[in-house]
Amino acid sequence: MKRIGILMCFVFLSSLGFAAIITLKDGRSVSGNILQKDAERVKIDADGMTMTYYADEIKDIDGQPLAPVQVAQPSTPAAPRAAAPAVLTQEDPAEKRALILKFIDVFGTRKNMQHNLDGMLAILAQKRPQDAQRIRDRFKIDEVIQRLVPLYDKRFTSKDLKAYIAFYSSAQGQKLISGIGDIMKESIAVSAEYLKEKFPEMVK
């Protein structure tokens, strides 16, 4: 599917940063234009999608480690101050949105949606090729993903999303995702066999 809007966005944002290759500690590499970089996080534009990676998951950027935070040490002890009242921190909407999109990709939601759509259209094209083509032209996975963002935003905090991303980016997390997919496929056959045993009169 053509993604003209995303391509235009990518072209525009390309002028705001510079291309870089980020190597993650789990072995993956991502590339894109750096939009923001500090000792805690790096925000990049990758194919029109804004993604944020944190220091604890980054191995290096273009072969160079992420610079640590430099904290100045006072020469003399500072005078004690009264503790400030606790303030509830508010989440950065843009950062949280980037976390949601990253989790959607790590969890395989986008990949599974595309796989299911391709499978459905392949079947439909055998009998109704014009309808299949019309759906392929109009149905945009990215548009559906954007509508899913509020669902994640309502249920998970940024802290939750960071933890989920860290786990599902790991080898154990990816194994779990793959295993669940296989179990779901096999469970259909198990359920069908169970129905045959319970309702033999319905089996022709």
Image (cartoon, grey):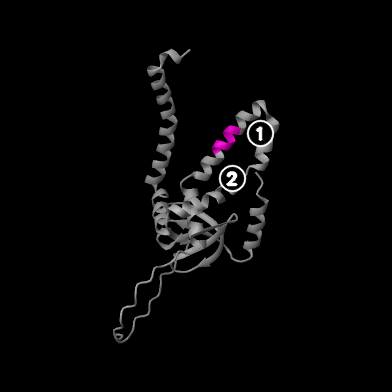
Q: Residue at x 46, y 46 (%)?
A: 107
Q: Residue at x 68, y 41 (%)?
A: 137
Question: Which image quarter holds the N terminus?
Answer: top right
Seen from the viewer's position, the closer of residues 60 and 87 is: 87
Seen from the viewer's position, the closer of residues 203 and 12 is: 203
x and y percentages locating residue 75 in the rendered image: 32, 86
Q: Residue at x 58, y 64 (%)?
A: 18
Q: Identify the secondary structure beneath mark 1.
A: helix
Seen from the viewer's position, the closer of residues 86 and 120 is: 86
Evaluate whether residue 62 shows in this view. Answer: no
Mark 2, residue position: 141
Dot 1 crowding, Cα within 10 Å, few <14, some 14–19, many 20+? some
**Which SS type dominates the magenta stretch?**
helix
Which mark sits nearer the N-terminus, 1 or 2?
1
x and y percentages locating residue 138 in the rendered image: 67, 42
Disc ID at residue 132: 1
Check if residue 116 falls in the magenta segment: yes
Amino acid type shown at disc 2: Ile
Span colored in magenta:
115-120
Evaluate whether residue 195 shows in this view. Answer: yes
Q: Is residue 191 above or below residue 155?
A: above
Rounded to the nearest angstrom, the CA distance separating label 1 from label 2 is: 15 Å
Asked if the residues shown at circle 1 and circle 2 are in contact, with their CB atoms under 8 angstroms apart, the answer is no
Q: Is residue 184 left or right of residue 114?
A: left
